[in-house]
Amino acid sequence: MYLISDAINLSSSYAVTASFALNAGAAFPFSGSAQITGSLGVTGSTRGNIVTVTAVSQTASLNLNLGNAFIFNAVSSSASASLLTLTNIPTGSNQKFSLLISQSVAGGANAFFNDQFYFPTSTPYTVSTTTGSIDILTFEMYTYNPTIAGNTGFQKGIVASTGVPPPAANFVSASGGTETTSGSFRIHTFTTTGTLTVFASGSVEILAVGGGGAGGGNTGGGGGAGQLIYSSSFTLPITASTVTIGAGGAGVSGQTSDGTPGGNGTNTTYLTLTANGGGGGGSYSVSTPNGEGANGGSGGGGGAREPSGTNAGGTAAFGAYGNAGGTGNDALYAAGGGGGANTAGTNASTNNAGAAGGDGLAYSISGASVSYAGGGGGSSTSNPGAGGAGGGGTAGLQSGGQGVAGTANTGGGGGGTGNLAGTSNIGGSGIVIIKYQFQ
């Protein structure tokens, strides 16, 4: 690994010229290798080989076999941030190299360092992005002792010239989303789509929730919660990847009588993870069984049906946390609740009472215990169904009650809506939270 020894930010460009001479009489320049025994006298100034590196597929590699001074011209797009890596790291100590990063074009491109570079503060150096700025960084070799606990497998590294020791552990390092800390842990929260750039890889805790489904209209079923995915040991690779946050499902007409369900939520994705959007709640239907809840991360609740019969709740996506929606019933004139991450939506079983949405699950990954992915409640002529814990919306009464939308960034399903001229309740948007030890 390499650790930054010193860094200089320059607001304008500069030029360096030098000549190289040897009093032993050898002629320069020449190709090949030169071996000198005894002393070397130099008159004037010396210059080493300056190597210009370019990014290929957003990665720029510094080959230390080629020299000890490197220039990197940042890419002219912040969306094309480059990852800096090292190859052919020499053995031994007291070896140094310098890196000049130039912002020669408009746009302010970023450049990031992989875990071969070590920074004493455990926070990677932030490259200046002002057009025309120049950063000069000096790195110094340090050889780890592989017998020291926590250093196993790390044979090379860099410590600062001030004598700062190498880290006791190889901590994860990343940037993106809303960043907060809790003790020795850093938390990245994505409530909208963004990019997570990983500088040093490792195992993290992660939570991902899809967008919740919308509630059904006209005595509609509750929307199903977005699928919930949680892992306490998810591996982050060194890369810059998009975190896509699923939107809540769109509402439908509050006066529909053809069973059209509320819209499904959209998927939340990051790397290999996909948390499916929740299913929309079914709407009131006449004579036909098409008021069923939609399938999704958790299923939407079935809408009320006339003159008799039931409308089934939607099913849940395979894997992770999600459950089916409850059944709606016209004999009871009530709709089913949307499924939640922890429990299924309740079936309409009490005369004229709407069914509750299924409960979600609580996690403390954000630094406090928060519930996510609750199902929406089902509508009825009296006692509308409650939303499930985790952002599920409470339903509205059949006689014009609006009810409540799913809570944003919980993946909660929207509550079923009564007979309205407007639209049914939307689902809550999804979320991604990543947590790891950084010091």
Image (cartoon, rainbow, N blue to C red):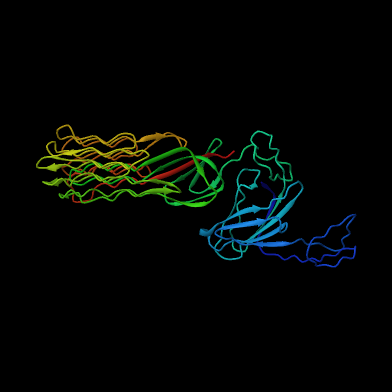
| Residue positioned most to the left | 307
| Residue positioned most to the top | 350
Figure disc tally: 0
**Image location (x, y in percent) of residue 12:** 66, 63
**Image location (x, y in percent) of residue 302:** 21, 41
**Image location (x, y in percent) of residue 178:** 48, 46
For this view, does 313 lie left or right of residue 297?
left
Quadrant hosting residue 381: top left
- Name which residue lies at 35% across and 39% down: 373
Quadrant hosting residue 376: top left
The answer to whether residue 300 is above or below residue 350 is below
**Image location (x, y in percent) of residue 34:** 82, 60
For this view, does 53 lie left or right of residue 308?
right
Q: Using the image as rendered, state which of residue 340 and residue 418 is in the foreground.
A: 340
For this view, does 178 lie left or right of residue 142?
left
The answer to whether residue 336 is above or below residue 125 is above
The answer to whether residue 207 is above or below residue 112 is above
Q: Using the image as rendered, state which of residue 87 and residue 267 is in the foreground.
A: 87
Quick one: quadrant of the C terminus? top right
Q: Using the image as rendered, state which of residue 407 and residue 212 is in the foreground.
A: 212
